[in-house]
Amino acid sequence: MIRSELIQKIADENPHLYQRDVERIVNTIFEEITDAMARGDRVELRGFGAFSVKKRDARVGRNPRTGESVEVEEKHVPFFKTGKLLRDRLNGK
């Protein structure tokens, strides 16, 4: 499902809301999650999962084409851990 499909589904299930309002709500939620992660905060949605940021240290990598050593800088990457309810639902429990 992509963002526009999510907005359409929510709008269809809530005919009393205008589509532009639903779009604004969905965009605000995603922006808040992104902003929290940019600050280094953890975002937990009970029953769904938790978004966090993990730090990857600098290291020496290899260029797969040439085999040459390459310095890879330290970076922060998003991480998602599923919640128990989502995991159970995916596994048919």
Image: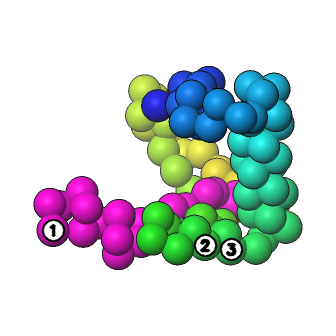
- The one nearer the camera, 51 or 66, is 51
Q: Which residue is mark 3?
A: 42
Position above or below: 29 against 86: above
Q: How is the image coloured?
A: rainbow
Q: Which residue is mark 1?
A: 93
Name the amino acid type tagged 2: Glu
Q: Which residues are magenta?
A: 75-93
Name the amino acid type tagged 3: Arg
Q: Position of residue 9 (x, y in %)?
A: 53, 31
The answer to which image quadrant residue 90 occupies is bottom left
Name the amino acid type tagged 1: Lys
Q: Position of residue 91 (x, y in %)?
A: 17, 61
Q: Quadrant of the C terminus?
A: bottom left
Contact check, label 3 and label 2, Cβ < 8 Å: yes
- Left or right: 67 with respect to 33? left
Position above or below: 24 against 72: above
* Residue at 61% in and 72% down: 44
- The one nearer the camera, 43 or 38, is 43
Which structural element holds mark 2?
strand
- Is residue 91 inside the magenta stretch? yes
Which structural element holds mark 1?
loop
